[in-house]
Image (spheres, helix red, strand yellow):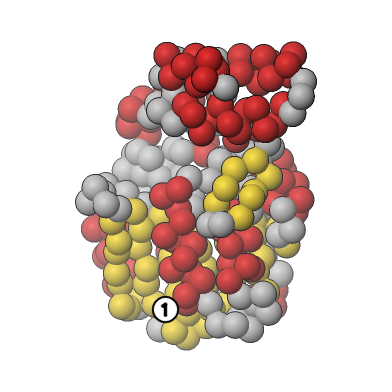
Amino acid sequence: MAELTAELSRAGCVAAEEEARDLVERAGDDPSLLRGLVDRRLAGEPLAWVTGRTDFAGQSVLVRAGVYVPRWQSMALALRAGARLPSDGRAIDLCTGTGAVAAALREARPAARVVATDSDSRAVDCARTNGVEAYLGDLFTPVPPGFRGQTDVVVAIVPYVPSGELRLLPRDTLAFEDAAHYDGGPDGADVLRRVVKEAPGYLRPSGALLLELGGDQADVLRPTLDHLGYGAIRTWSDDDGDLRGLEATWG
């Protein structure tokens, strides 16, 4: 274990000891399997793809190769969305990926109905394996009709990195992951704007829209939010002061 930790640390893994433990647990008593898993990780493959799982909001989430890996920064979004969701309410999780946020909402409100969508069939399959009611399609397109005007919470982690800043992502990110998971257009807000504009067709009065975003995107979206009639617009930041999300109330 100590040698493996040192090897991962030399390769630049920040949480080398934790990663070593996860890899050893995944490999069990098979040394050749462990070596293969370590080599994949050293090549830069996301740890969650290598081990097939990650922890999110207190739950173990299945992660399949090729599917966007949920980040710890998104936990605040999930917690805020759970707080806005009534015990018997309805929620839509857009661009669900593994279904981590939808699963967290379901855990917080077991009697609520939570549906999720994603345009990637691999993600939909992964989310369903995680117990999420997931549908294949673009944003709101595949949402069941009964959610129109009856949804308490819409939550979304859509691509929001400005196209010109993709090069600033960690080297291994785009070496393995699909750029479409991140590319939000020139200012990063192309998909965010679509969600803001389409969500009123699904939210009930006083329903909540919660978005993950960054940079100056709250200011970029503010005119659209105001024009459409959203209110009680709030943002939150992480411990470093970086913008992480926006919450707005419809009607």
Q: Position of residue 153 (x, y in %)?
A: 52, 73
What residue is disc 1 on? Answer: 250
Q: Is residue 194 above or below residue 240?
A: below
- The quadrant in which the C terminus is found is bottom left
Neighbour tally class for label 1: few under 14, some 14-19, many 20 plus, Cα within 10 Å: many
Compared with 93, 185 (above or below) is above
Compared with residue 211, is residue 152 higher up or lower down, i.e. above or below? Answer: below
Position of 35 with respect to 190 (left or right) is: right
Q: Residue at x 40, y 28 (%)?
A: 14
The residue lying at 33 percent from left, 32 percent from top is 165
Using the image as rendered, state which of residue 102 and residue 1 is in the foreground: 1
Q: Is residue 206 visible?
A: yes
Q: Which quadrant holds residue 30?
A: top right
- Quarter of the image with the N terminus in it: top right
| Residue 11 at x, y percent in the picture | 45, 15
Q: Is residue 123 above or below residue 243?
A: above
Side of 240 relative to 92 (left or right): left
The residue at 49%/29% (across/down) is: 17
Whether residue 192 sits left or right of residue 88 in the image: it is left
Q: How many marks?
A: 1
As rendered, which of 81 and 20 lies closer to the eye? 20
Asked whether 9 or 104 is in front, the reply is 9
- State the image coordinates of residue 180 (x, y, percent, origin top left): 52, 36
| Residue at position x 22%, y 51% in the image | 241
At which x and y percent is residue 123? 67, 44
Q: Amino acid at mark 1?
A: Trp
Secondary structure at badge 1 equals: strand
Q: Is residue 195 visible?
A: no
